[in-house]
Image: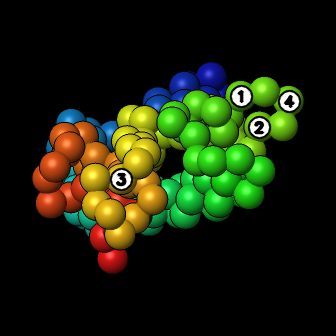
Amino acid sequence: MAFNAVIERRLAAASASRGMTLIEIMVVIAIIGMVMTAVTVGVVPQLKKSRINTTSMQLKTIEGALTTYSLDSDLPNSLDVLATGAGALLKPKQLKDAWNVEFVYTYPSQDSEREYDLCSNGPDKRSGTDDDICNYKE
Protein backbone atom coordinates (compact mmCIF):
# COMPACT_ATOMS: atom_id res chain seq x y z
CA MET A 1 0.00 0.00 0.00
CA ALA A 2 2.87 2.38 0.71
CA PHE A 3 4.24 1.64 -2.74
CA ASN A 4 0.95 2.75 -4.39
CA ALA A 5 0.97 5.99 -2.38
CA VAL A 6 4.48 6.83 -3.60
CA ILE A 7 3.48 6.20 -7.22
CA GLU A 8 0.34 8.34 -6.84
CA ARG A 9 2.38 11.23 -5.39
CA ARG A 10 4.86 11.04 -8.26
CA LEU A 11 2.07 10.99 -10.84
CA ALA A 12 0.43 14.02 -9.18
CA ALA A 13 3.74 15.91 -9.15
CA ALA A 14 4.37 15.05 -12.80
CA SER A 15 0.95 16.27 -13.92
CA ALA A 16 1.34 19.51 -11.92
CA SER A 17 4.61 20.40 -13.72
CA ARG A 18 3.52 19.54 -17.25
CA GLY A 19 5.19 22.59 -18.89
CA MET A 20 3.82 25.38 -21.06
CA THR A 21 0.98 25.03 -23.52
CA LEU A 22 1.22 26.10 -27.15
CA ILE A 23 -0.97 29.16 -26.47
CA GLU A 24 1.29 30.29 -23.63
CA ILE A 25 4.34 29.98 -25.89
CA MET A 26 2.58 31.96 -28.65
CA VAL A 27 1.67 34.74 -26.19
CA VAL A 28 5.29 34.99 -25.04
CA ILE A 29 6.51 35.17 -28.66
CA ALA A 30 3.94 37.89 -29.44
CA ILE A 31 5.08 39.95 -26.43
CA ILE A 32 8.73 39.59 -27.47
CA GLY A 33 7.79 40.72 -31.00
CA MET A 34 6.02 43.83 -29.68
CA VAL A 35 8.98 44.75 -27.48
CA MET A 36 11.41 44.30 -30.38
CA THR A 37 9.23 46.48 -32.63
CA ALA A 38 9.08 49.24 -30.01
CA VAL A 39 12.85 49.15 -29.53
CA THR A 40 13.48 49.21 -33.29
CA VAL A 41 11.19 52.20 -33.81
CA GLY A 42 13.00 54.08 -31.05
CA VAL A 43 16.57 53.07 -31.85
CA VAL A 44 16.86 53.29 -35.66
CA PRO A 45 16.35 57.08 -35.92
CA GLN A 46 18.84 57.60 -33.09
CA LEU A 47 21.36 55.39 -34.85
CA LYS A 48 21.12 57.54 -37.99
CA LYS A 49 21.61 60.73 -35.93
CA SER A 50 24.60 59.26 -34.13
CA ARG A 51 26.24 58.28 -37.44
CA ILE A 52 25.74 61.82 -38.75
CA ASN A 53 27.23 63.28 -35.55
CA THR A 54 30.14 60.85 -35.65
CA THR A 55 30.88 61.77 -39.27
CA SER A 56 30.76 65.49 -38.42
CA MET A 57 33.27 64.92 -35.63
CA GLN A 58 35.52 62.88 -37.92
CA LEU A 59 35.37 65.72 -40.44
CA LYS A 60 36.57 68.16 -37.73
CA THR A 61 39.38 65.76 -36.80
CA ILE A 62 40.56 65.58 -40.41
CA GLU A 63 40.35 69.38 -40.68
CA GLY A 64 42.58 69.65 -37.60
CA ALA A 65 45.07 67.21 -39.09
CA LEU A 66 45.08 69.17 -42.36
CA THR A 67 45.76 72.38 -40.44
CA THR A 68 48.63 70.73 -38.55
CA TYR A 69 50.04 69.28 -41.78
CA SER A 70 49.84 72.66 -43.53
CA LEU A 71 52.02 74.27 -40.83
CA ASP A 72 55.04 72.36 -42.16
CA SER A 73 54.18 72.32 -45.87
CA ASP A 74 51.42 73.00 -48.33
CA LEU A 75 48.14 71.08 -48.08
CA PRO A 76 48.34 67.53 -49.44
CA ASN A 77 46.74 66.40 -52.69
CA SER A 78 45.37 63.31 -50.97
CA LEU A 79 44.19 62.48 -47.44
CA ASP A 80 46.28 59.28 -47.49
CA VAL A 81 49.35 61.39 -46.66
CA LEU A 82 47.83 62.11 -43.23
CA ALA A 83 47.67 58.40 -42.37
CA THR A 84 51.01 57.15 -43.67
CA GLY A 85 54.57 57.31 -42.48
CA ALA A 86 56.18 57.45 -39.07
CA GLY A 87 54.66 60.81 -38.15
CA ALA A 88 51.13 59.98 -39.32
CA LEU A 89 48.57 62.38 -37.89
CA LEU A 90 45.61 60.01 -38.37
CA LYS A 91 44.88 56.31 -38.57
CA PRO A 92 43.65 54.96 -41.92
CA LYS A 93 40.23 54.12 -40.46
CA GLN A 94 39.79 57.80 -39.54
CA LEU A 95 39.70 58.63 -43.24
CA LYS A 96 36.32 56.86 -43.56
CA ASP A 97 32.94 58.11 -42.46
CA ALA A 98 30.42 56.28 -40.24
CA TRP A 99 29.15 54.35 -43.29
CA ASN A 100 32.69 53.07 -43.96
CA VAL A 101 33.09 55.19 -47.10
CA GLU A 102 36.18 57.34 -47.65
CA PHE A 103 35.81 61.09 -47.31
CA VAL A 104 35.93 63.07 -50.55
CA TYR A 105 38.80 65.56 -50.42
CA THR A 106 39.33 68.16 -53.14
CA TYR A 107 42.40 70.39 -53.10
CA PRO A 108 42.35 73.10 -54.27
CA SER A 109 38.70 73.84 -53.68
CA GLN A 110 36.30 74.57 -56.53
CA ASP A 111 35.23 77.65 -54.52
CA SER A 112 37.79 80.46 -54.28
CA GLU A 113 36.68 81.23 -50.69
CA ARG A 114 37.97 77.88 -49.38
CA GLU A 115 41.35 76.16 -49.63
CA TYR A 116 39.88 72.67 -49.85
CA ASP A 117 36.59 70.78 -49.80
CA LEU A 118 36.06 67.82 -47.48
CA CYS A 119 32.82 65.84 -47.66
CA SER A 120 31.12 62.63 -46.69
CA ASN A 121 28.50 61.35 -49.08
CA GLY A 122 26.19 60.82 -46.11
CA PRO A 123 23.68 58.04 -45.43
CA ASP A 124 22.77 57.47 -49.09
CA LYS A 125 26.48 57.16 -50.05
CA ARG A 126 25.92 59.29 -53.18
CA SER A 127 27.77 62.50 -53.89
CA GLY A 128 25.92 65.75 -54.55
CA THR A 129 22.75 64.98 -52.59
CA ASP A 130 21.15 66.91 -49.73
CA ASP A 131 22.41 64.53 -47.05
CA ASP A 132 26.10 65.14 -47.82
CA ILE A 133 28.13 66.27 -44.79
CA CYS A 134 30.78 68.82 -45.82
CA ASN A 135 33.20 71.24 -44.20
CA TYR A 136 31.42 74.17 -45.87
CA LYS A 137 27.86 73.20 -44.84
CA GLU A 138 26.58 74.30 -41.46
Q: Residue at x 40, y 64 (%)?
A: 114
From the viewer's perspective, is the residue at label 3 or at label 1 nearer? 3
Q: Identity of the amino acid at label 1?
A: Thr
Q: Reading the chain from its start, which is encountered first: label 3 or label 4?
A: 4
Q: Secondary structure at mark 4?
A: loop
Q: Give the answer, above or below, for where 36 lies relative to 138.
A: above
Q: Secondary structure at mark 3?
A: loop
**Which quadrant of the view contains residue 135?**
bottom left
Q: Which residue is mark 4?
A: 86
Closest to the observer: 131 or 40? 131
Q: Which mark is residue 88?
A: 2
Q: Confirm or deny contact between disc 3 and disc 1 (CB under 8 A).
A: no
Q: CA distance from mark 3 to mark 4?
A: 28 Å
From the viewer's perspective, is the residue at label 2 or at label 3 nearer? 3
Question: x and y percent of residue 67 in the render?
Answer: 65, 60
Q: CA distance from mark 4 to mark 1?
A: 7 Å
Q: Identity of the amino acid at label 3?
A: Ser
Q: Which residue is mark 1?
A: 84
Q: Reading the chain from its start, which is encountered first: label 3 or label 1?
A: 1
Q: Which mark is residue 109?
A: 3
Question: x and y percent of residue 123 in the render?
Answer: 26, 49
Q: Confirm or deny contact between disc 4 and disc 2 (CB under 8 A).
A: yes
Residue, far left:
129
Q: Identity of the amino acid at label 2?
A: Ala
Q: Secondary structure at mark 2?
A: loop
Q: Secondary structure at mark 1?
A: loop
At label 3, counting other C-alpha atoms closer than 10 Å, the crowd grade (few under 14, some 14-19, many 20 or more) is few
**Which quadrant of the view contains residue 95?**
top right
